[in-house]
Amino acid sequence: MRKWRSWLAAPIVGALLSVPLAAPLYAAPSPFISSCTTITSPGAYVVTKDITATATDFVCIDIKTPGVTLVLGGHTVTGSIESANNDVGILIESKATGATVVNGTVTGFGFGIWAAASGAKIQLVTADDNFIGILMGVVESATPINGNTVAHIQANDNVWVGIALFNTINSVVASSSANDNGLDGIVLGQRTSQDRVSANTANNNLDETTAPVKPALRSTLAAIIPSANSQDSASFFGNGIADFGNQNTIAGNTVSNNDNDGIVVFNTVEGNTAFGTQNSILGNHGSNDGNFDLFDDNTNCDSNVWVGNSGTRNLLPANTGKLTCIG
């Protein structure tokens, strides 16, 4: 049982998300957006040009109300990951249920897109070179967000994770790529349940040399895991898809050349609650991952079901045989 990593997220992301959000000091004057703004009325909004956040923009586009569709129009929202600010490219606040963000690029932020509301949809978006490309959920909330969708996303070359879900239920990550990220490709954190990760690719993760690092975030991470910015952390990170939740489904994904495991279910405990159980891992394929293509941290896979998967590196560390509960 790898208890040393109870998704590390709890201390790090919890600390990051506990910072109060200072909203931009302007409201959207029309459905057409050409600079960082706050959206306070339902409706469709269209980005008309590439937007670069200024040094004072903590959040570039802040969606505060339900019923918003934000069409990026193929444009790019850019921050400076090395800035003391520029922490969120597009924020869907908890009140903004059912918000949709489509068709564009968000790069250079602490969190490219952070959705803290139920029913949010993020589709046809590139979220590269952020600290975390796409984040769904709020770690410290007592209530999970429900029914979110991340689909047709490119989340590559991010400092930490391509796509991360925390405290979500009935949410989907589909038909997306999470490659060449500094730590993991796709993460289902603790208190995720009944989420589905399907038809994605997650390759070559634990590749920090490809992404810039925001100094303050590097310090936060290094204070907890001193080796996190070096290849010595290969035994901790470098997973294509990591599942710390319960009753999730991971199906039809392709993982390869990740530094640690291709797909891994972690057995962790928070208080008296055990995580990493009753998951279904179905029809995935792994190859050439550094440790295992397919791995379960539970003894004999516990109540997790592994069916129809294939991999080239599924031997026990001592090469004593296959993990027989993984099929």
Image (cartoon, helix red, strand yellow):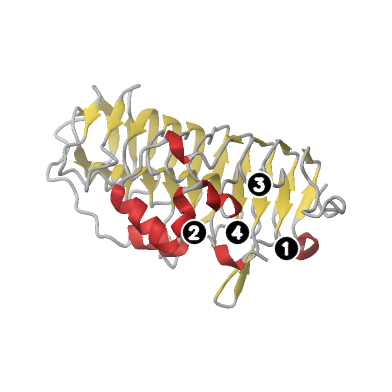
Q: Which residue is drawn at 39% across and 51% down?
A: 117
Lower position in the chain sequence, tag 2 or tag 1? 2
* Residue that label 3 marks: 261
* Residue that label 4 marks: 245
Q: What residue type is labelled 2?
A: Asn
In percent of width and height, residue 164 lies at 49, 48
- Mark 3 nearby-residue class (10 Å; few <14, some 14–19, many ≥20): many
Q: Which amino acid does label 1 sit on?
A: Asn
Mark 2–mark 4 contact, CB under 8 Å? no
Which label lies toward us, 3 or 4? Answer: 3
Q: Residue at x 50, y 51 (%)?
A: 165
Q: Distance between the residues labelled 3 and 2?
A: 23 Å
Lower position in the chain sequence, tag 3 or tag 2? 2
- Mark 4 nearby-residue class (10 Å; few <14, some 14–19, many ≥20): many
**Looking at the picture, does residue 277 appear above or below residue 98?**
below
* Residue that label 1 marks: 298
Q: Residue at x 41, y 33 (%)?
A: 128
* Residue that label 2 marks: 167
* Horizontal relation, residue 170 to residue 104: left or right: right
Which label lies toward us, 2 or 1? Answer: 1
